[in-house]
Image: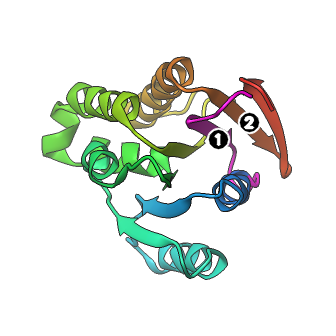
Amino acid sequence: MFRVNTELVLGGARSGKSSHAEYLAQTSGLDVIYIATATAGDEEMAARIAHHQQTRPNHWALVEEAVDLAGAIRRHSLPDNCLLIDCLTLWLTNCLFNDELALDWPGQKAALLAALAEAQGRVILVSNEVGQGIVPMGAMSRRFVDESGWLHQTIARQVDRVTFVTAGIPQILKGEA
């Protein structure tokens, strides 16, 4: 039987990607640790965070880590648990818009990839697919789309399975169902 240890779940906004990832974590049979990368910079984002918190099972552990994602993976990955990381594009935003971290983005990315390779339990990564539209105006927006795409490509090569969710329907792009 094929065992999925690492998985990338991609989708657009409100595609159902987080719900699908939560289903995978819930049915893994492992203890779940939810690693949240979001920060509430305004009321609307605070409401989104609250909605996600209300829909998750109460017995899942929560780790809030906006920047040191590699460290969080290293600290919490154990053979008998499942890390659910939601989401990579928010983490990327946190890194790119932090003046100190933006200068070391390649280092942050490399640290994440190394931590994923060393992870002991199951890891499910959730991320927004943002590169299917037009090329954005503005240098920073273009950099974000580019870095997001390159991050997804690199992670997709490394993980066991990649799933793309559209309208709540998961489609396996890599790996077995």
Look at 53% across and 20% down and name the residue there: 153
Residue 86 visible in the displayed image: no
Amino acid type at circle 2 is Phe
Look at 57% across and 58% down and name the residue there: 30
Q: Was residue 78 drawn as part of the magenta stretch in this picture?
A: no
Relative to the observer, which residue lies in front, 164 or 76? Answer: 76
Image position of 160 with respect to 22: above or below: above
Image position of 56 with respect to 91: above or below: below
Look at 43% across and 35% down and name the residue there: 144
Residue 11 falls left or right of residue 48: right
Residue 67 falls left or right of residue 32: left
Residue 147 falls left or right of residue 159: left
Q: Was residue 12 drawn as part of the magenta stretch in this picture?
A: yes
Residue ranking furthest to the left: 100
Residue 9's disc number: 1
Q: Main secondary structure of the magenta part?
A: loop
- Residue 155, percent across and down? 49, 26
Q: How would you rate the neighbour count of disc 1 (Cα within 10 Å): few for under 14, some for 14-19, many for 20 or more?
A: many
Amino acid type at circle 1 is Val
Residue 164's disc number: 2
N-terminal of the pair, mark 2 or mark 1, is 1
- Residue 52, percent across and down? 59, 72
Which corner quadrant holds the N terminus? Answer: top right
Q: Secondary structure at mark 1?
A: strand
Q: Secondary structure at mark 2?
A: strand
Q: Which residues are magenta?
A: 1-16
Residue 56 visible in the displayed image: yes
- Residue 161, percent across and down? 65, 29
Relative to the observer, which residue lies in front, 93 or 10? Answer: 10
